[in-house]
Structures are given as structure tokens and as C-alpha cells.
Amino acid sequence: MKNIILFKRALVIKLKLFFITLSCLFFFISCVSLPTLKDNHIRQNIQLYPEQWNWKEIYSGISLLSYIEKNIPLKWDMIMVDLKQNLDLISYPSINDIKSDGTNKGLTVKEFLKQSDSIFAVNATPFLYPKGRLNSQRKLVGLYINQGIVLSPAVEKYAALAFFSTENSTYKAVIYDSQIQVPNNAEYAFGGFFTILKDNQIIPFKNYSFDSRMAVGINENQDKLYILFCQGERKTKSTGLTFEECALILQKAGAKDALQLDGGGSASMEIKNESISNYKARSVANIFAFKDIF
């Protein structure tokens, strides 16, 4: 009988401690401001972009802005390119890098940056592994034009970024909602996924995820290029972004139109004499870069 009474007392004490702990936990949670996600998939009570856009010029016509929000955490980097400057646009693969079956061996963005001696380089068009991930061959999925030559066909449902030469030997950039809209006189074109910003309006998506992102935007005059790279492979370092959050950040930077390029583990930005990534990116099937015109 005595043992039963002691057991009941111990049980009462444990239950009291449990409810006290639960109450404290509820109080703690209620006092912490957690990120909320609205219907447009943009987190509301966190700072996704800087209040002051303090660009750092890394080369004539090319500027960099790096943003870190430790409370989320979030890390992204953006390059702004003045296309009116005399810069040379180059890309991988060339026609000689592509095999008869349409595949290429792939390169990391860092490898291409060094080989081409470029100022910066980023990944672009999505790709697949036609012979499996254990095989090194990659095949582009979407439009790719290199020096006026179509090296990969268009995919109608996806968007594209195209570059055209101007009379002043510079470039203008245009974003097309569908890759089949890109005209034949494009000097370069890079297929991506979807348009995320159109005429300064953020495009809503049904589903969302927080991931590593590579997105590009252009201004109204089509002479400024904004390239956003957000890391999301190591969630303790950076959670990544949604499509709509990418669109918002590019819009705040000055873009009127924007599209999503290949993201996830393919997302990679490399800059000469700068350290950007906190993870090792995979080899990709498509890269573009800007370098000096000697």
C-alpha cells in the first residue's frame, strides 16, 4: 500500500514538471518572432535584402553586392553588369565540346573561370545525365546559342535569356517567356526555367521550396544585367530562397524582368580574386562569363 502511495506521488510530481516545461516552451515560442510565409511565398518578418544597396565595383562595368542575414540564416551574392561597357561575353560549351549525341563532359564554374581568365562566371541552362549520374556526360535541356549557332534546341514551356550585339560592339539583353520566341539573330542565348518577374510584376507559383538559386534579371533599357546567386545547400549557413523571393530581390535591385536558371547543387558563381561559395558545386553543362576585351 505504501509503495502505491509513493508511486502516485512520484507520478503527480512528474506530471507537474511536464506541464511546467510545456508552459515554458509555449511561452518561449510565443515570444519568438518566427518567419511567416504569405500566399506569394515570400517570408514577411525577415529582411531578405539590404536597406542600402552598396555596390562594390570589382571591374569597370561590373559590380558586386554580398548580403548576409544571420538570423534566418541567408546568404546571397549579386553581380550587376553594365552591358554598355566593352566586355566580352563567352560561354561553355563550344561547338567543339559537344559530341555527336549532344552531350558534353561538363566543367565546374571555377574551372571555366580559370581556363577562360574571366572576371566572373556562372552556371546557366539545366541539364540531365542521359547515361546516369555515375557517367560524366551531361546533356542540355533547353535553348543554348553560342556565337549565333544553336547548340541545343528550345523547350517551349521554359524561358530564356538572350544577348544581342549592338552597333557599339556592346550587348543588350532580353528575357523571353518562351524559348521558341528567341529570334535567329541572337548572338548568345541561355535557356532556364520560368519567368519570375515580368514588367516589374512578381509571378506567383503554386508550389515553393527554399533552395540554392541562380536567377538573372534585366532593367527596362535592357542594358543592365543582374545575376543573383543564393546558397542553400547547407541550411545552417543559408536556407536558400523561393522563386518569388528571388524575383523580389532582383526587383529591388533594379530589374524589370527576370528568370530562373538552373539551381540546386548546380548553382555556382565564381569571381576572380573573390571567395563566394561555402560549398563545392558540381560540374555543369552550361556556363557563361564576362571578360575584358584586350
Image (cartoon, rainbow, N blue to C red):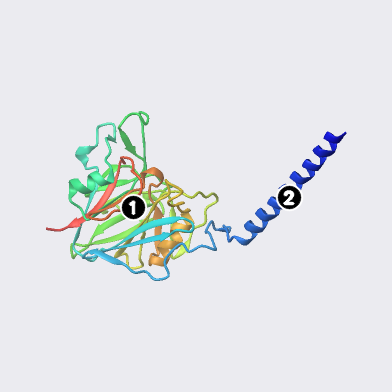
Q: Amino acid at mark 2?
A: Phe
Front position in the image: 189 or 79? 79
Mark closer to the chain start, 2 or 1: 2
Q: Residue furthest right?
A: 1
Task: Looking at this view, name the residue that lies furthest to the front.
Answer: 2
| Relative image position of residue 55 (x, y in whole percent) | 31, 67
Q: Is residue 262 visible?
A: yes
Would you say 288 lies left or right of 199 here?
left
Left or right of 136 in this view: 258? right
Residue name at image x 22 percent, y 38 percent: 97
Q: Quadrant of residue 66?
A: bottom left
Placement of 285 over or under 256, stated as above or below:
above
* Residue beneath disc 1: 182
Spatial CA distance of label 2 from label 1 is 64 Å
Residue 187 visible here: no
Tell me the quarter of the image containing the C terminus. Answer: bottom left
Position of residue 278 relative to residue 247, above or below, is above
Is disc 1 surrounded by few (<14), some (14 to 19) or many (20+) residues within 10 Å?
Answer: many
Question: What residue is pinned by disc 2?
Answer: 19
